[in-house]
Structure formats: C-alpha cells, structure tokens
Image (cartoon, coloured by chain):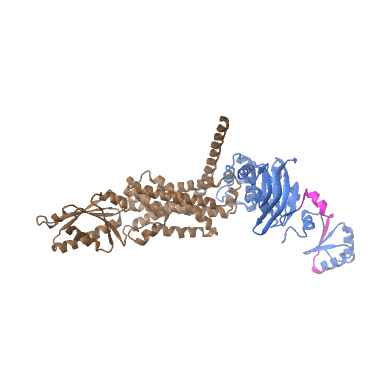
Amino acid sequence: MSKRNIGKKIGNFFLHLAHSFRRIGNHIRASVKLFYRSRLTVFLFIFYPIILLLLFGSIFAKQDLLLFDLGVQDNDETSVSNDLLLKLKSIDVLRTINITTDEDPKTVMQRDDLHACLVIPANWSVDAINPLYSSSNVTLIINSISQSALRVSHLVSNALREFNIEQNGTQPLVNIETENFISENLNYIDFFLPGIIGVIIMNTSLLGTINRQTHFKQAKLLRKFATTPLTRWEYVSAEIIWQFIIAFVATTLTVFTAWIVFSFSWSSFHALILPIVFVGSILFSGLGLLISQIIRNPNNSLIIGFLITIPMLFLSGVFFDVSGIRALTVLSKFSPLTFLVDALRSSMITHNFGNAGINIGIACAIGLASIIVGVFLTKWEKN
Amino acid sequence: MLSQENVIEISNLKKTYGSDEIIAGLTFTVKKGEIFSLLGPDGSGKTSTIEILVGLSKPSEGEISILGFNIKSTIEMREIKKIIGFLPQEFRTHDNLSVKENIQFWGKMYDNMIETSEILSILNLEEKANTRYKYLTPGFKKRVGLAIAFVNNPEIVFLDEPTAGLDQFSKREVWDIIKKFNKEGKTIFITTNDAIEPQAIADRVAIIHKGLMKDIGTPIELIDRFSSGNKIIIKSPTEQARLDAIGILQSACPLEVLYDEIIISSEEITLLEILEKLDKAKVRYSDIITQKPTLNDVFITLTGETLNKK
C-alpha cells in the first residue's frame, strides 16, 4: 500500500470520527433542550434528589442494626483478656473478628470495612489486676460517622461494665479510651451523601434511559434514526454522555445543597467522584438499555423502573447500613447500586482508594457488558 | 425531467414473515428524476417494500440496487443512507423541539444538510419555524416530515403514504411540494392506496396486489389499457327511485350498483340516451355525473377488488 493511500485512509478515518462526534454532539444538544423544556423531568432528576437529601438527611440520623462486627486485637493474650473476649462474644448482636497482633488495626478496618475495633494492649491484665492501679485502659477505635460504630461502642461499654462487676465488684477495672478512626469533622451527612449521589446516578441513568428508550420506540424515532447515517454506537454513546451530564449536574447541585444546609465537609469531595459518576452513568445506562428491551408497553416504563430501583435503594445501604443484617449483606451484592455506593463511600469517607477501585471496576464491567448486550439486542429496524 | 438512468433496480424481491409471503416477487426499476408510485390497498406489501429499500428490513430473496449500491451489503447500505431521504407512514419527531430545531436535529445527522432557512422557505414553514412540533396541525406536521425527508439534499426520497389522513387541501399542498422537489431533479418514490395521488403527480405507477406486481406504466397508459371510457354515475333520491332506474336501464346496458350509485360505462350508452329513458319512465334522480376512469378502475379491472376495502 502506498504512503498516499495510507494517508488517505487515515484522513478518512479522522473525517469519519469528526462526523461521528458531530452526530453525537447533535443528539446531546437536542437532549439538553428536551430536558429543560420538560418540567417533570427537571423535577425528577434535579430537584427530587435534593428533596431526598433534605428529607432523609434530617430524619435518618439514627438507625438500628441487627448484627455488628467488632475487630478485636488482643496484645495481652492472657486468661484475663480471654475472659473479656468471651464476655464480648456472649453478646448476640456482636460478631468479633480477630486481628492478629502484627497487623495495624486501622489498616484492617479500612481493608475490611470494619466500623469499630477494640485493642487490648500488651501487659494489660498485669495492670488490670495490679492493686496499685485503680483501672487500666483498652482502646476502642471507631468510625465516628458510622451509626453502627456508635452502637458497637455502646455495647462494648456495657460489656466492660459487666466485666468490671464480675472481676472486681463495682470498682471500675477497665476503662475505654475511644479513638476516632476518621476526621473529627465528619458528620452523618458525610455518610449519607455518597448514598444520595449513588441514587442520583441510578435515577438519572436507569430511569432516564428506560424512559427515553421507550418513548423513542413509541414515537418510532428509533426506526427513523435507522434510516440516517447515525449508528447505534453513536446513539448509545450520546445517550450515555447525556446521562452523565445530567448525573453530574444533579450531583453538583446536591453536594452544594449539602454544604449549605448540612455543612458538608468539602474535604470529602475529590477528583475520584467524577470518574465514579461517569462509571455509574455507564452502569445504569447499560442496564436501562437492557431493561427497555423487555418493556412492551411504554406506559409501564416508569412503573417497571421504580420496581427495579426501589429495592436497590434499600439493598445498597443508601439510607441505613445493611452490613449488620447477614441476609441483606448477601442480597446487596446482587444490587449494582451497592458497588457504586461502596465506591463512593470508600473514596469519600474512608479514603480507601483500593476498595473504591475494585468497586468501580465491578460497576464498569457490569455496565459495559450490559451496553454491549443492549446494543446487540436493540434492533432499531424491528422497533 | 426523466432520464433513462435507473436509480433503483429491483429484481424478484420477496419478503416472508414465517409462512406469510408479504412480497411475492417484485421486479421493476425506477428512473432518475421521476416520481414513481407504488399503488395498492393496505396489506399489499407497499410499506414492506419501502422498508426494505430504506434499510429498515432485509429482503428474504431478490436483488436490489440503489444508485449502484447493493442494499444487502452493510457497508453499501451506509452509503445509501447518506443519499436518501425517508418519510415514514406514521412520522413523529421531538414534540418539545421547534420546527426549526427539529429540522436542524435531523439535518445534522448528515454531512450535507440544506440551509434551514432554505428548507423552511421551500416548505412554507417560515411562520411556524419557532413553534414547537406538538402544537402543529396534522398538515403542518406532515410538512415538517417532508422537510426532514429532504433536509440532506437526497438524490432519492422515499415517501410512505405521505398524504394519508390529510384533507384535500393539505393533500394538494403536499403534492405541490413533492412536485417542486421533483423539478429540482430529485427522484421520488411514493407508496399510496389513493388512486388519485399517482394520477395527480406520478410519472409512472406500479400496481401491486397481495405482494405481486399487477402492471406498471404511466397513469394514462394504464387507464387507456384497462378502462373503457368515461363512467356515468346516477344518484337516486330514494331507494324506490333507484330500483326504478335499475329496472329501466338494465335492459339497455350492463350496469353496476355501488352503494346508492348506479354506474354505467359510457361506451355502452350515451348520457343523452340515459336521460331520455329516465324522463320517459318518469324516474326521479338527484344527480347524474360523467366521470373519467381512475386508477381505481384499473385496479378493479386487474384484481376484481377496490383499493379502499372499506
């Protein structure tokens, strides 16, 4: 092949690419106009999440969980410390997880998403039974913004009080020194906000895609698209970019509201959120594309959309922590929203970027698989 | 202006859905610059044919080329899509975009969009340019559909029943627009079940019935070939008057009764003779008209059925 031909082919490729971008841009421009001209859509995708934030941010400050994990590092390893551990293990709603003495408890907490960890120091029992000391300390490291951590702290305090009585009558034998695992400035809204951002992405991308797809099908616009140079990939790309734009705008407005109303700490908001919002848009647009293939009656599209999104809201721990409910913990892994919310919480609260990365990866893989299957199932011609 | 160059060549086109044969072997060509009409009743295979031509469905059998491109090739079909326009039977576009925005939306999907102002002017849509699509009357909506079908300056435009559901006035407007574009050299392919439409605008017409080609030619050729002169239609004021007229006339010439009309071929008897017979027998009539044969008559001759089954 001559150099001239190669040059021509490269030129054609870029020309083709430029035309594709123009068509994608054109589709997005029209979507923007259609969006702001529909009051219902603006309410549903922009103001509704803010209302959710204001409403649930105010009322979901306390929650009850059924099972709590407590990391325990026993550096003492004596019969006295063992008694304390047995005391803790006897509490039905507490599950103790042993942390070996060579591990850093905070690292384990971050890695395993533990909200509380009790550290029994070396030679603790010597001090505890030494009459020269009136008491000795254990350290409870907690994630202060986690509601379950607060409950664990309460349970451990009760257990220690009983332990004191059993060991030494009413005299306090063991005191707890509480150590905050995360920045002291964080409050409940910092825990709640990642969940709300997850909901925004899910609502805009999943419901948005289902709604648009079924409307386009009903109006036979997809058939008309099929007779133009617009390809299915260009169309799907434009749809995903559009869902991302909406999700990003809604997220920004919600975060801003959280800052104004709930004094949200901006230190939690960092650059990783942008790719998470993008991956979330891919994930839920892909699922929306798939689901819209099975919706025969366009009038049912929103009902089906809500039937799918509402269980995900509860399974994914948006409003309350499900880590204490074993059955829900297993089920939550089947909810794609879980991966998104976990990625957001890992990056915004615990700054566990490894965990965030894994969850982003899983969400991205599900999203891309859904898009590929969705695109191949989307027969414009038959629609 | 017609040229001898074929822009569409269809050979033995067949389309089946399961055991149903929708198109049973169509063969015809469309010449550059002509208005070609596919005439047939609902269910005759018109829409299936046009959908195959614009790439919305695949033929089960047969060969089709459009401007030399083979529609069976995905890559060649992509090229075809750039140079054709299409107005589907039930056209809708974005309700919340204005006429101008809708035209721009569809136009920007192509590399060679006509200036929006120009297309608005051709379609007489300037006044409605900023009106949202959902607020337009059916006639204007159809015009927007036509504007979108022509927005990429296509070489061939496919219009699937472009005047269906329109009143006579709107129909004429649409025909005028189609003729205007045709004068600019566009080849236009129309499907219709209205016999008047091809007579009004088509250069050639193909009559199809149950997926089969019955005949093809110019409207005049077909009428000359299959119709026998003008028709005389007698309308009676009462049922009794109609029965009396039938009694008087059926001995003089063959006649056909359709609803409240008595239809007689002018080759059998003259209008004067009919009037004399009815007056002599003192049979009342409310109207007597002479009608030129239409393509519907041709269709009846060819198939034994009318175009509008209703």
Residue at 89% x, 65% y is B251
Q: Colour of chain A?
A: brown
Task: Tell which of A48 and A194 is nearer to you.
Answer: A194
- Closest to the observer, B117 or B56: B56
Q: Position of residue A168 (x, y in %)?
A: 13, 62
Q: Nearer the viewer, residue B260 or A82?
A: A82
Of the 4 image quadrants, the one containing the C terminus of chain B is bottom right
Magenta-drawn stretch contains B216: yes
Residue A123 makes an appearance in the image = yes
Question: What quarter of the picture does the N terminus of chain B occupy?
Answer: top right
The picture places residue A19, in percent across and down from the top left corner, at 55, 39
The reply, left or right, for residue A92 in relation to residue B163 is: left
Location of residue B193 in the rendering, given as x and y in whole percent from the top left corner = 71, 55
Q: Residue at x 28, y 62 (%)?
A: A93
Taking the view exactly as shown, the residue that stands out farthest to the bottom is B240
A73 vs B236: above or below: above
Q: Residue furthest left?
A: A132
Of all residues shown, which one is farthest toward the front? A1
Write the start and end of the magenta stretch as one range: B214-240
| B31 relative to A336 in the view: left or right | right
Query: Would residue B161 be visible to someone looking at this image?
Result: no
